[in-house]
Image: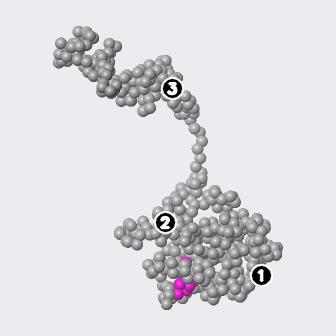
Amino acid sequence: MADYLNYVLSNPDLRENAEALGLTNEEMAEWGQWHFNSHGKNEGRQNTPTAITNPEGYTQTLGPEHYQGRDVEDVLQASVRSAAGGDFDESMWTARQAIDPTWNLGQYTAEGWNLAPDVPYKRGILGDTIGVDTGVGQIWSEGDPRFLQDRYVDAAIANDFPVGWVGEEGTWKGPEELAGYWSDVTNAIRNEAGDLRAIRDRPATGWAGTEVLDVGDRWSGNVRPGEGVGNVYGTGGYTQPAPLDWSAIRPEVSYTPQFEALTGNLMSNWQPWARGQATPSGLLNYQVPGGKQANVTYTGANPSLFSTDTSGSSFSSGNTTTDTSGTKWVMTPGGQWVKAGSDYGSALTGGGRVYNPNFYDSSGAYIGSEGFSYDSSGWEMTPAGTYTGAHTSDLGHLSLPGGGSGFSFTPASERTDTVSQAQRDAISGTSFFD
């Protein structure tokens, strides 16, 4: 018969995830079943829901050997945070977020987490006595009024709460109803077995609103440091996030060793914004890999390289620049300088219609859609300077049935315009004007 409670408790990595989530008996069984079916059955674990072959797993402290040599706090934090917004309901964190939205899984920190097993918590899970005190967002154990979950080592007990809830002198600055519970956290002691115990019984109505005591000896003067630039309580620098556990969406098909490398390690290679991707540890203070810190700044701009004149930001009259010889130039939309007096320059500065850029040559002269231009008499010329024999009067107005209009070609025999002999001579191999 499958035993998902012991599957979780006998695997240190699963146990610490469950303790961080504050799972009850029912929740742990559900979570353990989900984990085994989605991940654990393919991970080659010694302890499974049907067989415990490594009983030492119950008492082992979570270490790098359980995470393939990776940083324990980074991986644990990413794994716990990955549950934020998921389908699974962690009732302790639901209660916390109801007290204050900032107290959510997304801000969980594994810094200072107690990586050793919490024996009273294990006893409570197996005895099904663990419940959630919704008034303070903590778990409690029925029949053990002095039970406190041993979440963080003494120096980091403030890390169980959002940034700013504990003052520098250990004074409580969070929700008022939790002030008494903070008193019990700071005054808690360990018995001879090392189990954390409160110095007074939990009231039958819960920890919320209990008498506030002086800050106790367990308080060591540390407050949770600010994290991230977006936290309203943050006072520290940017903290690069750890990779999340995306193994649940990892393709089960194995293609090549390269594919395995790409999708391994919780699919961290698919999270370039996360720590462990060989990216700088800081954004403002860049750490050269293998070298010393280099503060990246920018000073000493050369004013001669820049112009603050915005008059050329649009094409209208006056948007020109004058060279040392006094010639005015205007820049085309394509980034080319042409003389302001050219066809294109005049059009750009408001002196006429602007045609397609392909209708102008490199000097800004209008050459038409076919690459030709016209002389002062209206005769069409090629870019090489020869005449084609066509004239602007070749296109005449024509009335069409129904009131429409169009254009028609006027034969040379009907034109009254004449062309000079020089122009005739320029036309090579044609008798168009004869």
Of all residues, the one furthest to the front in this rendering is: 402
Within 10 angstroms of label 3, few (less than 14), some, or many (20 or more) residues?
A: some
Q: Secondary structure at mark 2?
A: helix
According to the image, label 3 marks what residue?
Answer: 316
Residue lying at the far bottom of the rendered structure: 1
Q: Earlier in the sequence, mark 3 or mark 2?
A: 2
Q: Is residue 24 above or below residue 237?
A: below
- Helix, strand or loop for disc 3: loop
Give left or right: position of 324 versus 401: right
Nearer to the camera, 344 or 397: 397
Q: Which labelled disc corresponds to residue 268? A: 2
Find numbered disc 1 in the image and state the secondary structure of the residue it sits on: loop
Residue type indicated by callout 1: Pro
Q: Amino acid at mark 3?
A: Ser
Asked if labels 1 and 2 touch by Cβ distance under 8 angstroms, the answer is: no
Q: Residue at x 39, y 24 (%)?
A: 364
Q: Position of residue 310 (x, y in %)?
A: 56, 31
